[in-house]
Amino acid sequence: MRRRPRVGLLLTGDEVIEAGMPAPGRVRDAFGPQLPAVFAALGCEIAGVERRGDARAGIDAALDALCLDCDLIVSTGGTGHADVDAVRAAAQDRVAAGRARSLFAELAMRPGHPTFALEYSAPTGRRVLHIALPGNPLAAMVALRVVVQPAVRGLLGQRAEETAVGRVAEAIPGGRAERIVPAARDARGNWAETSGTGSNMLRGLAAADGLIVIPAGGAEDGQEVPLLMLPW
Ligand SMILES: Nc1nc2c(c(=O)[nH]1)N[C@H]1C(S)=C(S)[C@@H](COP(=O)(O)OP(=O)(O)OC[C@H]3O[C@@H](n4cnc5c(N)ncnc54)[C@H](O)[C@@H]3O)O[C@H]1N2
Ligand code: MOO
């Protein structure tokens, strides 16, 4: 068995506060309280947690620090295409400078489409994977299940998981791309979307047993769709 992958967390956003009632324009951190436990459940060790605002210098410094000591960096926020989205900008500059290789720049799924991944050549000579999750809490947790969990299996030397299937309890509309939908099993063993599944909400995920994958055209009553069970 391989050693536990060392994971560095980079939580970004000027507006994120860690305690208390958020003032207008502020938001309480949804990731710090849960990601360490999720990574422990996946078999990883948290090597460091960096909290930074949106300033590029801070993001660069945090990435440099985490690269020295981690196998995997997982960041939250800053994945958009605007100038203020410093995580994507920092990653793009590293690729342009030959210090990193882009693995993918976007995903054809909702929520979570701005997720991207790259691999750094760290000064230590090690390769460090960076998976950048969006700031919206459900989008980030969906991308964690779809991308980060399989990556961790790879780092642990485990085989890719087999995709399960679930039968939807009733028709579910599609979207512009595949929809990844928090869902719970009903008494007959069929899967129904939980309530509170906006990409900024975690309520529907908290009540879910798994994520079902709804094709762009939607799923009909009783249709079998891919199913990803949740690791917690
Ligand atoms: N022009 C476009 N704008 C946006 C698009 C697009 O396709 N074109 N996609 C939207 C989608 S979808 C998402 S998701 C977000 C991704 O944006 P970022 O990764 O840059 O995330 P932020 O702007 O930093 O934050 C988004 C949202 O999440 C809140 N947040 C951030 N960190 C935390 C935290 N630790 N705890 C709780 N909430 C957090 C943040 O306050 C924002 O409300 O881009 C859209 N825009
Ligand atoms: O994907 Mo955003 O990733 O819908 O909240």
Image (cartoon, helix red, strand yellow):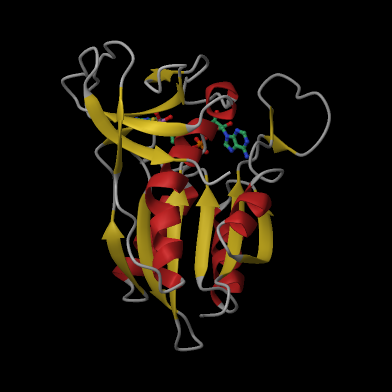
Q: Nearer the viewer, residue 120 or 196?
A: 196
Which sits in the foreground, 188 or 53? Answer: 188
Residue 125: x and y in percent read: 45, 88
Answer left or right for 190 relative to 139: left
| Up/down of 28 relative to 192, above or below | below
Residue at image point 58% right, 46% down: 54
Residue at 66% x, 23% y is 25
Locate residue 118, reporting x and y percent.
Answer: 36, 63
- Measuring from the top left, give residue 175's x and y in whole percent: 25, 20
Residue closest to the eye, 7 or 115: 7
Q: Residue furthest bottom?
A: 125
Ligand 2 sits in which quadrant? top left
Horizontal relation, residue 228 to residue 207: left or right: left
Count of numbered circles in the view: 0
Q: Is residue 147 above or below residue 198?
A: below
Write the residue at 51% across / 88% down. 124
Left or right of 123, for residue 69: right
Instruction: Using residue 65 as the reference point, say whether residue 154 is left or right of it.
Output: left
Residue 45 position, x and y percent, is 64, 67
Look at the image and tell me in which quarter the C terminus lies: top right
Residue lying farthest to the right in this orientation: 20
Q: Residue at x 38, y 51 (%)?
A: 147
* Residue 177, image quadrant: top left
